[in-house]
Amino acid sequence: MLGLMAARQAGLDDPARLRRAERTRRVLSLELNKDRDVERLHGSGINTLDIEPVEGRYMLSGGSDGVIVLYDLENLSRKPSYTCKALFSVGRSHPDVHKFSVETVQWYPHDTGIFTSSSFDKTLKIWDTNTLQPADIFHFEGTVYSHHMSPVATKHCLIAGHRQEVLAVSWSPRHEYILATGSADGRVKLWDVRRASGCLSTLDQYNGEKSKASSETANTAHNGRVNGLCYTNDGLHLLTIGTDDRMRLWNSSTGENTLVNYGKVCNESRKGLKFAISCGCNPEFAFVPYGSTIAVYTVFTGELVTMLRGHYSTVNCCVFQPHFQELYSGSKDCNILAWIPAPREPVPDDISEKSLPQQRVNPAYEDAWSSSDDEG
């Protein structure tokens, strides 16, 4: 690290390399923060979390009891030990509280004055953050398992929501009109919302080699329910997870299964599973709820890096905070846990980097940055 800093200071290295190396180090050292608590207001399991992308300071949570809570993650006390306070909540006594389990909460991507929520009560609500009143309520005939707003759309304000057996939806962070959906029939479809026919393609786990696929599994992404999907930050790849205990990485442009082997990814959830992908690291990492733990994988090689343990019951969701490389997770145990990078050991001023013992690093974690990474 000292070598990277010296090279950057001398103008011999691109600043992006130091940023990537430090972000990667921080993610690889994530641990349960025993000094940071998140105020507990939920009386039942937590299904969904979202951190607003504007400041990365405010977090929403939605629970099986229909309650929505907004937290301030900033340490205003400046003390080592502190509690992330709840600024407000839509509790059971609120006149507009969801009647049943809240499955998804999401901030409006460009303004913290609006957030959205959807529930098993067959409604999707648009909330005014300042007044804590719904600006609009959409009623559906079937259960709303998931919804999502595009993070890059400039020409539309569409919210993607599906009824009944579509368990996961995600807008592309690269193309504002492209939408991915995952269904209980094992299929993942890519849509262009400008087209009358809609569906662009159906992802095939066998990449079109039908001779190897039975008629029952042809043109399916998973041999089970697809209940989680997430784009990489650049939008070039899509990661999906199914109840067949498999996770797959797809080229979002060609629809090709990249055949990365993650091994068995335990997934017993009967509804949507919210997982997260890091941002700005090399390599990138996926944080996947795995029973009462969170499994951390390298996205492009499939290596299981570590298991984060701290919850007492099934983990339902996790969200990554890219500004400080922190992770927050919600569980059926009603707790939200904060996972932060372990502090770096200070180096005495009179010791040079060359004199320090050299630690062997897995080649998968070495920074493979090149000047072309941030071009185009």
Image (cartoon, grey):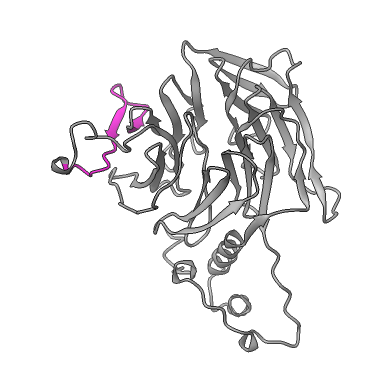
- Which residue is painted at 47% across and 10% down in the image? 141
* Left or right of 106 on screen, residue 298: left
Q: Position of residue 303 (x, y in %)?
A: 43, 59
Q: Position of residue 131 (x, y in %)?
A: 75, 21
Q: Position of residue 245 (x, y in %)?
A: 40, 42
- Is residue 177 among what the camera can see? no
Q: Tell which of 48 and 192 is nearer to you.
A: 48
Residue 200 on the magenta span = yes
Q: Quadrant of residue 117?
A: top right
* Left or right of 97 on screen, residue 223: left
- Which residue is painted at 80% across and 44% down in the image? 83
Q: Tell which of 263 and 105 is nearer to you.
A: 263
In the displayed image of the protein, which residue is found farthest to the left? 211
Point out the image quarter for the N terminus. Answer: bottom right
How many marks can you see?
0
* Left or right of 132 on screen, residue 144: left
- Is residue 191 among what the camera can see? yes
- Which residue is painted at 39% across and 44% down in the image? 238
Residue 281 on the magenta span = no
Q: Quadrant of residue 198?
A: top left
- Which residue is painted at 64% across and 31% down in the image? 45
Q: Position of residue 322 (x, y in %)?
A: 60, 51
**Residues drawn in magenta:** 188-209
Above-or-below relation of 4 to 70 = below
Point out the image quarter for the C terminus. Answer: bottom left
Above-or-below relation of 9 to 185 = below
